[in-house]
Each structure stands twice: as structure tokens, then as C-alpha cells.
Image (cartoon, helix red, strand yellow):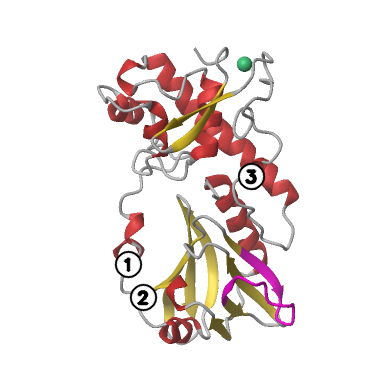
Amino acid sequence: MPELPEVETVRQGLNQVTLGQEIWGGDVLLDRTIAHPFSANEFLARLKNVTITNWHRRGKYLLAALTQSNTGDAGWLGVHLRMTGQLLWLNQQDPLQKHTRVRLFFPDNRELRFVDLRTFGQMWWVPASEAPESIITGLKNLGPEPFSSDFSIEYLVGKLQNRQRTIKAALLDQALVAGVGNIYADEALFLSGIRPETLCSALKLEQIERIRTSIIQVLQASIEAGGTTFSNFLNVQGVNGNYSGVAWVYGRTGEPCRVCSTSIERIKLAGRSSHFCPKCQQ
Ligand SMILES: [Zn+2]
């Protein structure tokens, strides 16, 4: 599943190729990809002749600010890739991928194509009169962005102290911090030297500070890795994303720890696999 760094890489790519261009049409091949408005035809009608001025990211949500030459502010286009969604920047005559769900047509024969095998991905059009979170309700419950000053040590201590859940479950909670999923939670806990099953209430102040720093560090490193390989193919490949091949522990069960050569172990926590080094994470 794409996490914050992969979505951020897609956002940067979209800003490179789609800005200032007027959408002239499109096609919805799977109606339920469109979460708002109710009708796919209305979705396309609302996007016709609008221009994307900027792509923003909030957690794992992509939000394009829209303008129209007559009316000015034309609302927002929201996208969530969920498990397997991909945004591709292609020529309109390029053969359709089997799981193509939505096509948006741009000048010069270009196209933004949404391909999604598992069909959990969603798109929204939000009118200018509404706040995005009033239509895209998942935005309402998002915690702070990890790179923002709101994600402070004071904030994190307040959220973690006296809580009886595991730190792994806490990091996966989008209300605690936006955009961190299974990959980067495992990686941040490795860098912090903390076992995923540790209860939040047992964490010392110094450990919470290390967790905060590690989250920021691992997300930043992955964004930088993705940014260097970005092409016109806005590709987000399932679980590996930007991080393919360089993970400390994620997806490396049974392989030697890159620090101490101990075999990486995996346990189930909160229904998800957690990977850790039994020696480096005590
Ligand atoms: Zn180790």
C-alpha cells in the first residue's frame, strides 16, 4: 500500500506534468471509483474545462486545487490510491491497462489515467463552496503531518503516555500521525531500537523522542529515494514503493539484520505483520 513517501512522490510528479493545463474531458470506466458527486457523469462535467493550479498532499490523500477561467475557484479534485491505485501520465492512444478505472484528458493528447487492480481507490470532486474535509470525510480524522511543527515531542508524549496499546498499533493510527503505514512504522521502530509490541505506557521520554525523529528521518529518506527515480510514469507499486530493496527490516523475515546479522523476525500485531531485529530492538 502506498504510504506518505510514495504519495508525496506522486504529488511531486503530478506537479511537474499537469499544472496550468485545462482538462477537456474524460471517461469513468468504473462508477464506484467516484466517491463524490454521486454520478460519474456529473464528476466529469465538473472537471471539464478546469485547470489544475497545484497538487497538495494530506496524509495519503492527494488534493488538486482547481480553477476555471469564467468562475475562478473551481473546487478540488481528491484522489486516494488505497491498496493498488496508480496514476499514470500517458498518451491517450496508449493501450488501456486492464484495470483502468478513470481517464482524464489533457491537451496535446496527454492523459492522466487511474489504474487500480483492487478497486479500493477513490476520487472526489469537491465544490469550491465546501471544505474538502466536509466531502472527503477521511480527512477529518487525520493527525498532524509528520514534517509539521504540530508533530512535536509534546504532542507525541501527550498521545502516547498512559496508553495501553502497542507502539506499532499507535503508529498505524492515522489520527496519531498522518501517512505512516506498516512499512515506515516497522522501519522507524528499528531505527529507534524499540520492539513493535512495546506498550506506549512503558515508553520513556527519550524513546518517544527517538521514535519521532526516526519517523521523520525514514520518511524523508524514502521521499528523496523516490524523487531521484521519478519519470513520467507516476508509478506506485504496491507494498515496496520508493523503499524497495533498502528496508532495514520490512519484508526481510529470516534475512540477516543489516546492523548485527541476527535473523529478522516477524510477529502479528493489530492484524498486521511486524518486522524487527530481536537484538537491535530490545
Ligand atoms: Zn540487528
Q: Which residue is mark 2?
A: 127
Whole-percent x and y of residue 152?
39, 31
Q: Which residue is mark 3?
A: 240
Whole-percent x and y of residue 2?
55, 50
Q: Answer with the quarter of the image where residue 244 lies.
A: top right
Q: Residues within 10 Å of mark 1 (few under 14, many from 20)?
A: some
Magenta span of residues: 87-102
Report the disc number at residue 135: 1
- Judge whether 70 appears above or below 258 on screen: below
* Label 1 with label 2: CB-CB less than 8 Å: yes
Q: How many marks?
A: 3
Q: Residue at x 67, y 82 (%)?
A: 107
- Judge whether 72 appears above or below 264 on screen: below
Q: Classify residue 256 as left or right of residue 185.
A: right
Q: Residue at x 35, y 29 (%)?
A: 156
- Near-viewer residue (22 or 26): 26
The type of residue carrying mark 1 is: Ile
- Near-viewer residue (57 or 28): 28
Q: Answer with the quarter of the image where residue 201 lies.
A: top left
Whole-percent x and y of residue 104?
58, 78
Q: Residues within 10 Å of mark 2 (few under 14, many from 20)?
A: some
The type of residue carrying mark 3 is: Asn
Q: Classify residue 194 as left or right of residue 127.
A: right
Q: Earlier in the sequence, mark 1 or mark 2?
A: 2
The type of residue carrying mark 2 is: Pro
Which secondary structure, mark 1? helix
Which secondary structure, mark 3? loop
